[in-house]
Amino acid sequence: MSTLSPKTPGWLDWYGEPSKPAFTLPPGSVDAHCHVFGPQATFPFAPERKYTPCDASREQLFALRDHLGISRNVIVQATCHGADNSAMVDAVRASGGRARGIATVRPDITDGELRRLDEAGVRGVRFNFLKRLVNTAPKDDLAAIAAKIAPLGWHVVLYFDGADLPELEDFFGSLPTPLVIDHMGRPDVTRPVGGPEFSRFLRFVDGNDVWVKVSCPERLSVTGPAALNGERHAYTDVVPFSRRAIEEFPDRVLWGTDWPHPNLTDHMPDDGLLVDHIPLVAVTPEQRHRLLVANPMRLYWPGEGT
Protein backbone atom coordinates (compact mmCIF):
# COMPACT_ATOMS: atom_id res chain seq x y z
CA MET A 1 0.00 0.00 0.00
CA SER A 2 1.46 3.36 -1.02
CA THR A 3 2.23 6.02 1.57
CA LEU A 4 0.34 9.29 1.17
CA SER A 5 2.50 12.33 0.56
CA PRO A 6 2.26 15.23 3.01
CA LYS A 7 0.98 18.56 1.78
CA THR A 8 3.42 21.16 0.52
CA PRO A 9 4.67 23.19 3.53
CA GLY A 10 2.54 26.29 4.02
CA TRP A 11 -0.29 24.94 1.86
CA LEU A 12 -3.55 26.76 2.48
CA ASP A 13 -6.60 24.48 2.58
CA TRP A 14 -9.84 25.69 1.03
CA TYR A 15 -12.28 27.66 3.17
CA GLY A 16 -14.28 25.11 5.10
CA GLU A 17 -17.51 27.00 5.87
CA PRO A 18 -18.18 29.50 3.09
CA SER A 19 -20.84 32.12 3.68
CA LYS A 20 -24.14 32.10 1.84
CA PRO A 21 -23.83 34.72 -0.91
CA ALA A 22 -25.92 37.86 -0.59
CA PHE A 23 -26.00 37.99 -4.40
CA THR A 24 -28.42 35.47 -5.88
CA LEU A 25 -26.92 33.88 -8.97
CA PRO A 26 -29.13 33.70 -12.08
CA PRO A 27 -30.78 30.29 -12.55
CA GLY A 28 -28.50 28.02 -14.57
CA SER A 29 -25.23 29.69 -13.54
CA VAL A 30 -22.02 27.86 -14.44
CA ASP A 31 -18.76 27.76 -12.50
CA ALA A 32 -16.48 27.55 -15.55
CA HIS A 33 -13.21 27.06 -13.67
CA CYS A 34 -12.76 24.70 -10.74
CA HIS A 35 -10.70 21.63 -9.87
CA VAL A 36 -10.66 18.39 -7.93
CA PHE A 37 -7.60 17.11 -6.06
CA GLY A 38 -7.54 13.37 -5.50
CA PRO A 39 -8.52 12.21 -2.98
CA GLN A 40 -4.90 11.12 -2.99
CA ALA A 41 -5.67 7.64 -1.66
CA THR A 42 -7.90 6.98 -4.68
CA PHE A 43 -6.31 9.16 -7.36
CA PRO A 44 -2.57 9.52 -6.63
CA PHE A 45 -0.83 12.75 -7.57
CA ALA A 46 1.67 12.78 -10.44
CA PRO A 47 5.31 12.07 -9.52
CA GLU A 48 6.46 15.10 -11.54
CA ARG A 49 4.10 17.54 -9.76
CA LYS A 50 5.37 20.85 -8.43
CA TYR A 51 3.13 20.80 -5.33
CA THR A 52 1.16 18.40 -3.13
CA PRO A 53 -2.27 19.85 -2.28
CA CYS A 54 -4.96 18.99 0.22
CA ASP A 55 -7.67 16.60 -0.92
CA ALA A 56 -10.64 18.26 -2.63
CA SER A 57 -13.12 15.63 -3.75
CA ARG A 58 -15.95 15.67 -6.25
CA GLU A 59 -18.46 15.38 -3.39
CA GLN A 60 -17.00 18.48 -1.75
CA LEU A 61 -17.06 20.37 -5.05
CA PHE A 62 -20.70 19.46 -5.68
CA ALA A 63 -21.62 20.44 -2.11
CA LEU A 64 -20.07 23.87 -2.72
CA ARG A 65 -21.91 24.13 -6.06
CA ASP A 66 -25.24 23.57 -4.33
CA HIS A 67 -24.41 25.86 -1.39
CA LEU A 68 -23.53 28.78 -3.66
CA GLY A 69 -26.52 28.31 -5.99
CA ILE A 70 -24.46 27.19 -8.99
CA SER A 71 -26.03 24.77 -11.49
CA ARG A 72 -23.05 23.37 -13.40
CA ASN A 73 -19.27 23.10 -13.29
CA VAL A 74 -16.39 23.02 -15.73
CA ILE A 75 -13.67 20.97 -14.01
CA VAL A 76 -10.18 21.83 -15.17
CA GLN A 77 -7.40 19.26 -14.83
CA ALA A 78 -5.06 20.26 -12.01
CA THR A 79 -1.31 20.24 -12.66
CA CYS A 80 -0.76 18.07 -9.56
CA HIS A 81 -2.37 15.20 -11.50
CA GLY A 82 -0.24 15.67 -14.62
CA ALA A 83 -1.73 13.96 -17.67
CA ASP A 84 -3.64 11.38 -15.62
CA ASN A 85 -7.17 12.72 -15.99
CA SER A 86 -8.80 10.01 -13.87
CA ALA A 87 -9.92 12.22 -10.96
CA MET A 88 -11.33 14.90 -13.25
CA VAL A 89 -13.13 12.39 -15.50
CA ASP A 90 -14.52 10.58 -12.46
CA ALA A 91 -15.99 13.86 -11.21
CA VAL A 92 -17.47 14.77 -14.59
CA ARG A 93 -19.06 11.33 -14.94
CA ALA A 94 -20.50 11.56 -11.42
CA SER A 95 -22.15 14.92 -12.12
CA GLY A 96 -25.10 13.51 -14.04
CA GLY A 97 -24.43 15.77 -17.01
CA ARG A 98 -23.94 18.87 -14.85
CA ALA A 99 -20.18 19.10 -15.45
CA ARG A 100 -17.75 19.27 -18.34
CA GLY A 101 -14.03 18.64 -18.22
CA ILE A 102 -10.79 20.18 -19.44
CA ALA A 103 -7.99 17.63 -19.77
CA THR A 104 -4.22 17.61 -19.91
CA VAL A 105 -2.96 15.26 -22.62
CA ARG A 106 0.34 14.28 -24.22
CA PRO A 107 1.13 14.51 -27.95
CA ASP A 108 1.02 10.72 -28.36
CA ILE A 109 -2.59 10.42 -27.19
CA THR A 110 -4.59 8.28 -29.59
CA ASP A 111 -7.80 9.25 -31.35
CA GLY A 112 -9.53 6.47 -29.44
CA GLU A 113 -8.43 7.91 -26.11
CA LEU A 114 -9.63 11.35 -27.17
CA ARG A 115 -13.01 9.91 -28.18
CA ARG A 116 -13.35 8.27 -24.77
CA LEU A 117 -12.61 11.58 -23.06
CA ASP A 118 -15.14 13.29 -25.32
CA GLU A 119 -17.80 10.72 -24.44
CA ALA A 120 -17.06 11.30 -20.74
CA GLY A 121 -17.74 15.02 -21.11
CA VAL A 122 -14.33 16.54 -21.80
CA ARG A 123 -14.48 19.55 -24.11
CA GLY A 124 -10.95 20.92 -24.18
CA VAL A 125 -7.32 20.67 -23.17
CA ARG A 126 -5.24 23.00 -21.05
CA PHE A 127 -1.83 24.36 -22.06
CA ASN A 128 0.10 25.72 -19.08
CA PHE A 129 2.84 28.31 -19.62
CA LEU A 130 3.36 29.30 -15.98
CA LYS A 131 7.01 28.64 -15.29
CA ARG A 132 6.43 27.89 -11.61
CA LEU A 133 4.02 25.06 -12.50
CA VAL A 134 5.62 23.41 -15.54
CA ASN A 135 9.20 22.90 -16.60
CA THR A 136 8.61 23.57 -20.29
CA ALA A 137 5.76 24.10 -22.69
CA PRO A 138 7.11 22.78 -26.01
CA LYS A 139 5.18 24.51 -28.75
CA ASP A 140 5.58 21.71 -31.32
CA ASP A 141 3.98 19.22 -28.94
CA LEU A 142 1.16 21.61 -28.12
CA ALA A 143 0.50 22.34 -31.78
CA ALA A 144 0.29 18.59 -32.42
CA ILE A 145 -2.24 18.20 -29.61
CA ALA A 146 -4.33 21.11 -30.89
CA ALA A 147 -4.44 19.55 -34.36
CA LYS A 148 -5.69 16.26 -32.85
CA ILE A 149 -8.49 17.84 -30.81
CA ALA A 150 -9.75 20.29 -33.43
CA PRO A 151 -11.95 17.71 -35.24
CA LEU A 152 -13.78 17.06 -31.95
CA GLY A 153 -14.80 20.71 -31.70
CA TRP A 154 -12.78 21.10 -28.51
CA HIS A 155 -10.95 24.25 -27.44
CA VAL A 156 -7.60 25.04 -25.84
CA VAL A 157 -7.46 26.63 -22.39
CA LEU A 158 -4.38 28.82 -21.95
CA TYR A 159 -2.73 29.69 -18.63
CA PHE A 160 0.06 32.27 -18.83
CA ASP A 161 1.36 35.47 -17.29
CA GLY A 162 0.32 38.67 -19.04
CA ALA A 163 3.95 39.78 -19.25
CA ASP A 164 4.70 36.76 -21.45
CA LEU A 165 1.99 37.43 -24.05
CA PRO A 166 4.30 39.24 -26.55
CA GLU A 167 6.42 36.10 -26.98
CA LEU A 168 3.41 33.75 -27.07
CA GLU A 169 0.66 35.49 -29.04
CA ASP A 170 1.84 34.44 -32.51
CA PHE A 171 1.86 30.80 -31.40
CA PHE A 172 -1.55 31.16 -29.75
CA GLY A 173 -2.97 32.75 -32.87
CA SER A 174 -1.73 29.84 -34.99
CA LEU A 175 -3.71 27.20 -33.08
CA PRO A 176 -6.65 25.69 -35.04
CA THR A 177 -9.16 25.79 -32.18
CA PRO A 178 -11.04 28.36 -30.12
CA LEU A 179 -9.00 29.61 -27.16
CA VAL A 180 -10.12 30.17 -23.56
CA ILE A 181 -7.79 32.30 -21.44
CA ASP A 182 -7.59 31.73 -17.70
CA HIS A 183 -7.88 34.66 -15.30
CA MET A 184 -7.77 37.45 -17.91
CA GLY A 185 -4.23 36.46 -18.84
CA ARG A 186 -3.00 37.33 -15.34
CA PRO A 187 -2.59 41.09 -15.80
CA ASP A 188 -0.39 43.18 -13.54
CA VAL A 189 -3.16 45.14 -11.79
CA THR A 190 -0.68 47.72 -10.50
CA ARG A 191 -0.46 48.98 -14.10
CA PRO A 192 -3.17 51.17 -15.66
CA VAL A 193 -6.15 49.30 -17.09
CA GLY A 194 -5.78 51.48 -20.20
CA GLY A 195 -2.04 50.96 -20.40
CA PRO A 196 -0.13 49.11 -23.12
CA GLU A 197 0.02 45.71 -21.39
CA PHE A 198 -3.69 45.11 -20.88
CA SER A 199 -4.54 46.90 -24.12
CA ARG A 200 -2.33 44.40 -25.96
CA PHE A 201 -4.21 41.56 -24.29
CA LEU A 202 -7.56 43.04 -25.34
CA ARG A 203 -6.34 43.46 -28.92
CA PHE A 204 -5.25 39.82 -28.94
CA VAL A 205 -8.71 38.73 -27.78
CA ASP A 206 -10.39 40.96 -30.33
CA GLY A 207 -8.31 39.61 -33.21
CA ASN A 208 -8.72 35.90 -32.49
CA ASP A 209 -11.36 33.30 -31.56
CA VAL A 210 -10.86 33.86 -27.84
CA TRP A 211 -12.96 33.58 -24.68
CA VAL A 212 -11.83 35.17 -21.40
CA LYS A 213 -12.33 33.89 -17.86
CA VAL A 214 -13.05 36.84 -15.59
CA SER A 215 -11.88 34.88 -12.59
CA CYS A 216 -9.41 34.71 -9.70
CA PRO A 217 -9.39 38.26 -8.36
CA GLU A 218 -7.90 36.76 -5.20
CA ARG A 219 -4.92 35.60 -7.27
CA LEU A 220 -4.45 38.89 -9.12
CA SER A 221 -5.04 41.44 -6.37
CA VAL A 222 -2.15 43.31 -4.79
CA THR A 223 -3.97 45.64 -2.41
CA GLY A 224 -7.18 43.68 -1.63
CA PRO A 225 -9.14 43.81 0.56
CA ALA A 226 -9.53 40.05 0.83
CA ALA A 227 -12.85 38.25 0.47
CA LEU A 228 -13.05 37.40 4.17
CA ASN A 229 -15.01 38.49 7.24
CA GLY A 230 -18.05 39.64 5.31
CA GLU A 231 -16.11 41.87 2.90
CA ARG A 232 -18.36 42.44 -0.14
CA HIS A 233 -16.14 45.01 -1.86
CA ALA A 234 -13.09 42.79 -2.17
CA TYR A 235 -10.13 43.05 -4.56
CA THR A 236 -10.97 46.57 -5.72
CA ASP A 237 -7.73 46.84 -7.72
CA VAL A 238 -8.87 44.00 -10.01
CA VAL A 239 -12.38 45.37 -10.63
CA PRO A 240 -11.46 47.81 -13.47
CA PHE A 241 -9.78 45.00 -15.43
CA SER A 242 -12.73 42.64 -15.03
CA ARG A 243 -15.23 45.34 -15.98
CA ARG A 244 -13.22 46.24 -19.06
CA ALA A 245 -13.14 42.64 -20.30
CA ILE A 246 -16.89 42.24 -19.72
CA GLU A 247 -17.69 45.51 -21.46
CA GLU A 248 -15.45 44.80 -24.46
CA PHE A 249 -16.43 41.14 -24.96
CA PRO A 250 -19.87 40.58 -23.37
CA ASP A 251 -20.47 37.40 -25.40
CA ARG A 252 -17.04 35.86 -24.76
CA VAL A 253 -16.54 36.10 -21.00
CA LEU A 254 -16.84 33.32 -18.44
CA TRP A 255 -16.62 33.17 -14.64
CA GLY A 256 -15.30 30.56 -12.23
CA THR A 257 -14.50 30.07 -8.56
CA ASP A 258 -11.09 28.40 -9.03
CA TRP A 259 -12.04 26.20 -6.07
CA PRO A 260 -10.10 24.81 -4.21
CA HIS A 261 -7.74 27.70 -5.01
CA PRO A 262 -4.39 25.93 -5.54
CA ASN A 263 -1.10 27.55 -4.58
CA LEU A 264 -2.47 30.60 -2.81
CA THR A 265 0.03 31.78 -0.22
CA ASP A 266 -1.45 34.96 1.25
CA HIS A 267 -5.00 34.02 2.24
CA MET A 268 -7.81 31.62 1.38
CA PRO A 269 -10.98 33.41 0.26
CA ASP A 270 -14.52 32.72 1.37
CA ASP A 271 -16.19 31.33 -1.77
CA GLY A 272 -19.51 32.91 -0.82
CA LEU A 273 -17.85 36.33 -0.87
CA LEU A 274 -16.30 35.54 -4.26
CA VAL A 275 -19.85 35.16 -5.58
CA ASP A 276 -20.64 38.53 -3.99
CA HIS A 277 -17.77 39.99 -6.01
CA ILE A 278 -19.63 39.30 -9.29
CA PRO A 279 -21.98 42.33 -9.18
CA LEU A 280 -18.93 44.60 -8.79
CA VAL A 281 -17.66 43.56 -12.23
CA ALA A 282 -20.81 42.53 -14.12
CA VAL A 283 -22.93 45.55 -13.27
CA THR A 284 -26.16 44.88 -15.20
CA PRO A 285 -28.50 41.87 -15.19
CA GLU A 286 -27.79 41.34 -18.88
CA GLN A 287 -24.03 41.24 -18.31
CA ARG A 288 -24.48 38.79 -15.45
CA HIS A 289 -26.71 36.47 -17.45
CA ARG A 290 -24.24 36.35 -20.33
CA LEU A 291 -21.23 35.86 -18.04
CA LEU A 292 -22.78 33.19 -15.86
CA VAL A 293 -25.36 31.40 -18.03
CA ALA A 294 -25.59 32.17 -21.74
CA ASN A 295 -21.89 32.18 -22.61
CA PRO A 296 -20.78 29.03 -20.75
CA MET A 297 -23.85 27.16 -21.95
CA ARG A 298 -23.06 28.08 -25.55
CA LEU A 299 -19.47 26.90 -25.17
CA TYR A 300 -19.94 23.76 -23.05
CA TRP A 301 -23.57 22.65 -23.55
CA PRO A 302 -24.41 23.92 -27.05
CA GLY A 303 -27.95 23.22 -28.08
CA GLU A 304 -29.22 22.69 -24.54
CA GLY A 305 -30.43 26.26 -24.16
CA THR A 306 -30.34 28.17 -20.90
Image (cartoon, rainbow, N blue to C red):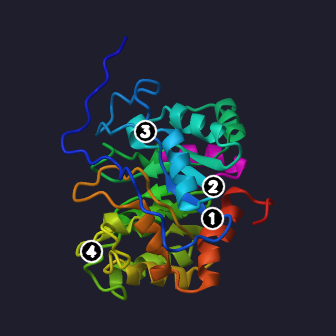
Residue nearest the viewer, comparing 207 with 12: 12
Q: Which amino acid type is shown beneath numbered disc 3?
A: Phe
Identify whether 43 is placed above or below 106: above
Q: Residue at x 56, y 76 (%)?
A: 207
**Residue under circle 4?**
225
What residue type is disc 1 on?
Ser
Question: Residue 287: image x %, image y %?
Answer: 60, 81
Q: Depth check: give the residue in front, 107 or 159.
A: 159
Which residue is under mark 3? 37
In what quadrant of the picture does the N terminus appear? top left
Outermost residue, top side: 1
Q: CA distance from mark 3 to mark 2?
A: 18 Å
Q: Magenta residues, as a range? A: 142-156
Count of marks overlaid on the render: 4
The residues bearing labels 2 and 1 have C-alpha atoms spaced at a distance of: 7 Å
Residue 138 position in % (x across, y down): 41, 45
* Mark 1, residue position: 29
Local secondary structure at mark 3: loop
In the rendered image, which quarter is residue 300 located in?
bottom right
Disc 2 + disc 1, Cβ < 8 Å: yes
Q: Are marks 4 and 1 in contact (CB under 8 Å)?
A: no
- Judged by depth in the image, the label closer to the viewer, 4 or 3, is 4
| Residue 225 percent across, percent down from the top left | 27, 74
Q: Is residue 9 magenta?
A: no
Locate residue 294 relative to residue 106 in the image: left or right: right
- Residue under label 2, please give it: 72
Q: Earlier in the sequence, mark 4 or mark 1?
A: 1
Image spot of residue 273 (x, y percent) = 41, 68
98 horizontally vs 305: left or right: left
| Residue at disc 2, secondary structure | strand
Check the picture and name the quadrant holding the C terminus: bottom right
